[in-house]
Image: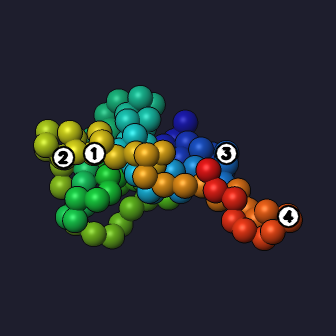
Amino acid sequence: MNILNFINALRETDKYIETIYTRGGCYRFHLLLKQMYPECEPMINISKDHVATLYEEELYDINGVVQQEIWTPMTQEDIWEAEKWSFAKHNWLSLGECPHCGEEITI
């Protein structure tokens, strides 16, 4: 399967997939792509807060092809830091509003 088709299909599996992989899970998304496409290499942006995947001379993240910013190959130190990133440890998901009081329901 073409990598972009895989990314699009994965993104369409659940409305929270994009949120998870853009708010702490980007390095884990790279690791998923690396399992599917072993030639993938991790790249990090200049502000060192987002990881993209280099595959066949294109950069990808959960949104598809990445074109902005300056990207460099990840060093071992970058990898150690990115391994600590986690959506689940630092974010909440909204389940909508409570039908009785209108407050946002988060998990």
Give 47 or 64, whichever is nearer the viewer: 47
Q: Earlier in the sequence, mark 2 or mark 4?
A: 2
SS for callout 3: loop
Mark 1 or 3, which is nearer the eye?
1
Q: How many marks?
A: 4
Give 32 or 80, whichever is nearer the viewer: 80
Q: Earlier in the sequence, mark 3 or mark 2?
A: 3
| Three-letter amino acid code of the residue under disc 4 | Pro
Q: Circle 2 is placed at which residue position?
A: 78
SS for callout 1: helix
Residue at left 53%, top 47%?
Answer: 7
How far separated are the C-alphas under marks 2 and 1?
6 Å
| Three-letter amino acid code of the residue under disc 1 | Ala
Residue 40 pos. (x, y %)? 32, 38
Q: Circle 3 is placed at which residue position?
A: 13
Q: Circle 4 is placed at which residue position?
A: 99
Residue at left 64%, top 56%?
Answer: 106
Left or right relative to 98: residue 62? left
Mark 3 or 2, which is nearer the eye?
2
